[in-house]
Amino acid sequence: MSTMSETTTIWNIDPSHSSLEFSVRHLMIATVKGRFSDVTGRVVSDDSDLTTSQVEVAVGVNSIDTREAQRDAHLRSPDFFDVEKFPTLTFRSTRITDVSNGTFKLVGDLTMHGGTREIVLDVTTEGRGKDPWGGDRAGFSATTKIKRSDFGLVWNQVLETGGVAVGDEVKIAIDLELVAAQ
């Protein structure tokens, strides 16, 4: 992280008010959604220039939840995430581009299943204010799409119709509530 100035704020992710959700096509006819509940990290921002902010996020892959225990166990297995070998998914920002009026392109390195790829998140500022206990809070939402095969997550089954059981494209939706470090 960079040198701190007088306008620098360190923000911690509030995991109880944040979510990291994903969706992927199933059997080429439906969409399965899931989430990770173990999301931690921090943002270091300069209030005078948010494009210099730095973002670091860690996700405990074992916290995956698709509301189906058998599927979750399969996703944790070596066929997919292999949580014994790769327990954490990480994101570290490399640059931020101000698009307009509270929207940004957040570029960074996503490391998952032992592979690292650059991804771009479309970020929207959702607001900032004081909580009832005097703490500073800020909210952001972000979306992106990735190909799971880019990270070595290639398990699949071919269907009789010629399609596949699990789509390659994964849509990601993130809602973060940050709290300023005291």
Image (spheres, grey):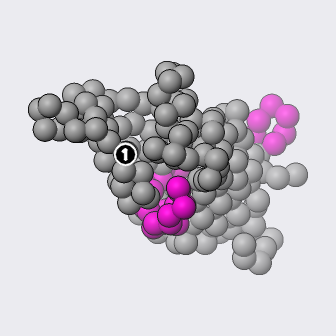
Q: Which residues are magenta?
A: 106-135
Camera-nearest residue between 168 and 19: 168
Query: Badge 1, how many Cα within 10 Å: few under 14, some, many 20+?
Result: some
For the residue marked with disc 1, what is the amino acid? Trp
Camera-nearest residue between 72 and 48: 72
Dot 1 lies on which element?
A: loop
Q: Position of residue 49 (x, y in %)?
A: 61, 70
In this view, which residue lies farthest toward the bottom? 3
Q: Position of residue 124 (x, y in %)?
A: 48, 50
What secondary structure do most residues of the magenta stretch adopt?
A: strand
The quarter of the picture where the N terminus appears is bottom right
- The residue at the point 39 percent across, 36 percent down is 23
Which residue has dot 1 on it? 155
Q: Is residue 126 magenta?
A: yes
- The residue at the point 55 percent across, 47 percent down is 82
Q: Is residue 98 visible?
A: no
Q: Is residue 163 magenta?
A: no
